[in-house]
Image (cartoon, rainbow, N blue to C red):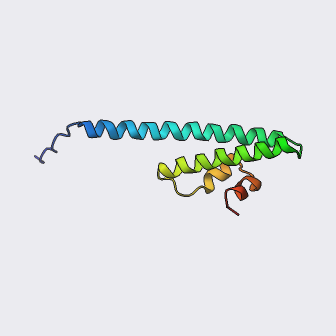
Amino acid sequence: MPPRPAPHFVTGLDTLESELLAEKAAALGRSAEAAKCALTKLKTCHERDEARARLLKSAARAVHHYFIQRELCGLRRHDDAIRNLAIPREVLVRLGAS
């Protein structure tokens, strides 16, 4: 008969780590939604005025926050996020990407 594995006791640290992971995931979801919303507003604005400039700035800020949250979750490459959200080049340029 094979030896039994040692029982795993849930510690306070295990509980804390679980809570932190859940909060990271929730924050990632919220930042993704904020980025989607800002990008949608930018895409629906067809004018070239101050309003569009504000929307561009807002979209770049939201995408930047989303990228930071992804990195905090261990997701270092953003190619899939750029593709899935259809982030326009004008937003990426504001983030320093080319």
Instruction: Write the residue at 50% across / 36% down.
Output: 26
Q: Is 48 left or right of 83, judged from the image as shown?
A: right
Q: Is residue 13 above or below residue 72?
A: above
Q: Quadrant of the C terminus?
A: bottom right
How far across and down, in percent of the image, does residue 28 sit? Answer: 53, 41
Image-based side of 27 in relation to 7, left or right: right
Looking at the image, the residue that sits furthest to the front is 50
In this rendering, the count of numbered labels is 0
Query: Residue 92: x, y in percent?
Result: 70, 56
Residue at image point 71% right, 45% down: 59
- x, y percent for residue 38: 71, 40
79 versus 19 height, above or below: below
The quadrant in which residue 97 appears is bottom right
Q: In the image shown, does 66 or 94 lie closer to the viewer?
A: 94
Q: Nearer the viewer, residue 8 or 47?
A: 47
Q: Quadrant of residue 11?
A: top left
Q: Residue at x 59, y 55 (%)?
A: 78
Q: Nearer the viewer, residue 5 or 66?
A: 66
Residue 45 location in percent, x, y? 84, 40
Q: Is residue 64 left or right of residue 88?
A: left
